[in-house]
Every structure is written in C-alpha cells, then in structure tokens.
Image: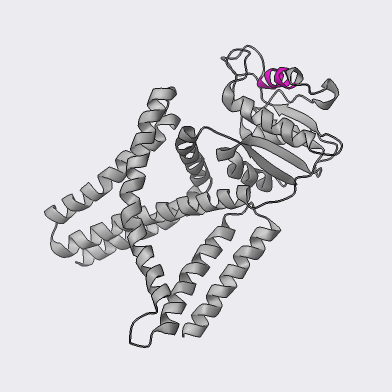
Amino acid sequence: MATIILILAALLLLAGIAGFVHDRRRLRNIVFVLFGLGIGLIGLVLYHDDGRGLSGPLAMVLVFMVVAPLIGYPILTIFLLINGATMIKRERRSLGNLLSLFTGVIMVALPIASVVVQLHLPGRAAGVVTTGLFGIALYFGFSFLVLLLGSLAYRKIPTKLHGQYVIVLGSGLKGTTVPPLLAARLDKGIEVANAQDPPATLIPSGGKGSDEQISEAEGMARYLRERGVAESRIILEDQARTTEQNLIYSRRLLPSPDTHVIVATNSFHVFRTAMLTRELGMDAQVVGSHTAFYYVPSAFLREYAAISAQFAGLNLTLLTTWTAMVIAVLVVL
C-alpha cells in the first residue's frame, strides 16, 4: 500500500512540475505539487512504520506540520491587524485597503465562534459544527496558499524575458500626474524594454476615468518621454477601463495577435494578469515592479478575492457540498 501511495505522489509531483514548465500560469500546477507532497508524506509514514515509531527527520516534519499552523495562526492574525492599522494611517479608507484589517478581525472571531459553539450546543453537535467551520476555513486557507505559492513561483523562478513590445497596465492618475504605484510599473516597463535588443516598444494602456483630466495612457506616455523614451517607441492605448481591456485593446496594436509580448504591472498583480493572458490566448510574460511592503497584504487579498470570483462556480459547489454534508450529519444526530 505504501509503495502505491508513493507512486501516486510521484506522479502528482511530476504532473505539477511538467505543467509548470509548459505553462507556469496555471494554478492546478501548484495543486498537484501540494497534493503530491501531502500524499508522499503519508506514504513515507506508512513505509517507515514498523511499530517502533518514526525516524527522527520524518517525525520532525510531522511535528512541524502540526506546530506551524498553531504558531502561525496567531502570528498571521496579529500581522494582519497591524497591517490594517498601517493601511488606515497611510492610505485612503477604501474597502480594498481595509481587507487585511477585516481578515485579521475574522481570524480573531473564528476561535471565539468555536468556543461559543462548544458552550451552547450538545457535545456531538458542537463537534460537527466546529468541524464544519474548520473545513471551510481550511478550504479558504488552502486556496489562498495555492495562489500565494503560484504567484511566488511565477515571479521568483528565473525565466528569460524576450519581446519587442512591452504593455504597461494603467492604474489611475492624480490629475495629470503619475502616482508612485503607476510610476513603479512604468519604471519596470522602461527597464525591461531597454534590456531588449533592439530596445522594445512600450504600450502604455489606460482610458480616461470620470475623475481624470487626461487618459491614463497619455499621462503614462508623458512620464515615459520625460525619462528619455523616444516617441517612436511609444504606442498609446487610451480606451481600456479594466485589466482585461488593457490586454485586449493593447493586443490589437500588435503586428499580430500571436506576437509575443511582455506585460508590466505591480508585483502583487502579476499572477492574476498572467492568468488573464492565458485565458485570452496571449503569448505573454508578466513582470512586476517593487511595491511598498505595507501595501502588499491588502493588495494581494484583493487579488485573491478577484481570482476566487473567477472560480465562483467551483467554490460554491465545493462549499455547498461540504455544508450539506455537515447539515446531514446534524440531522442524523
């Protein structure tokens, strides 16, 4: 049995690694790798189980898997609460900027809710409800981990950038001025474009919002010119209102829809953008600019929410099935 489990784990790991090499923009690559590692650990436990206990290294791994969440949960909760307070102090109070604070509050509330359930429901029912809540929390935790690891793997594992067109995604102006977040994207775009041989053409992409005096593309183009980018290397896309439109409308300006392109955005936005390029059938690489550390947690939680919405059908089906199972057990009890 242990050998069969280890073979299954190896196959899942190979599928995840091969999938990543073929196209690193898929979340399922990370799912395969994580399941492969988890099943592989179970196989190792069974393989080394001789009735006298586990070997030192394997026992340490199992202890770490149990202790890490117990220690990590309160640490992460405190971090999110502090980060939420920092966002309130440094940024405008929008729902997106407050996501880290809200998440921290929810993480405080979950253990309290579990205690309340234990105190007010009969023993078995309390255990079932607590298990149900734990299962939902585990699902969201796992899906968040998949996105986090997918994003890190996409950005951190080296790959050679090549292309004669660099799309820079817009993110809003302050009047006619490029704010720091957008400036970082443009600086990254310039860096990547200048590294190509010959230097690549830049496509600043973004329409004019209701509260903006000029289009984002024009403001971005001015920024590029001020930093020495020749007019002949700038093509404006000034109609887009969303990230998807940034990509679709910019693609129309390329010599061919199949032209390989590099897309520049902020670090927290890289993986969702990469997923969009795959969905649109674009031959693209996405690069990210540096973002202030305090800004990343709330921004990445926004990315998680947006990607979760893309998979709303799957998420709803799995969570509904789990909830129905919990309710069915309560009815039986």
Residue 323 visible in the current orientation: no
Task: Indicate left or right for 158 with 49 as reference.
Answer: right
Location of residue 239 with respect to 68 vertically, above or below: above
Res 251 → quadrant: top right
Q: How is the image coloured?
A: one colour
Res 79 → quadrant: top left
Location of residue 1 with respect to 186 vertically, above or below: below
* Identity of the residue drawn at 61% across and 41% down: 270
Q: Is residue 221 magenta?
A: yes
Measuring from the top left, give residue 178's x and y in whole percent. Answer: 62, 19
Hey, which residue is sitting farthest bottom in the picture?
50
* Identity of the residue drawn at 39% across and 31% down: 98
Measuring from the top left, give residue 21's x and y in whole percent. Answer: 68, 60
How many marks overall? 0
In the depicted view, which residue is nearer to us: 54 or 270? 54
Task: Indicate left or right for 215 with 119 as reference.
Answer: right
In the depicted view, which residue is nearer to us: 215 or 154? 154
Measuring from the top left, give residue 171's x and y in whole percent. Answer: 60, 27
In the depicted view, which residue is nearer to us: 18 or 132? 18
Measuring from the top left, give residue 127's x and y in whole percent. Answer: 21, 62
Q: Is residue 325 magenta?
A: no
* Identity of the residue drawn at 52% across and 69% down: 36
- Residue range corresponding to the magenta coloring: 216-224
* Identity of the residue drawn at 58% across and 39% down: 267
Residue 286 visible in the current orientation: yes
Provide the major secondary structure of the magenta segment.
helix
Res 175 → quadrant: top right
Name the quadrant of the C terminus.
bottom left
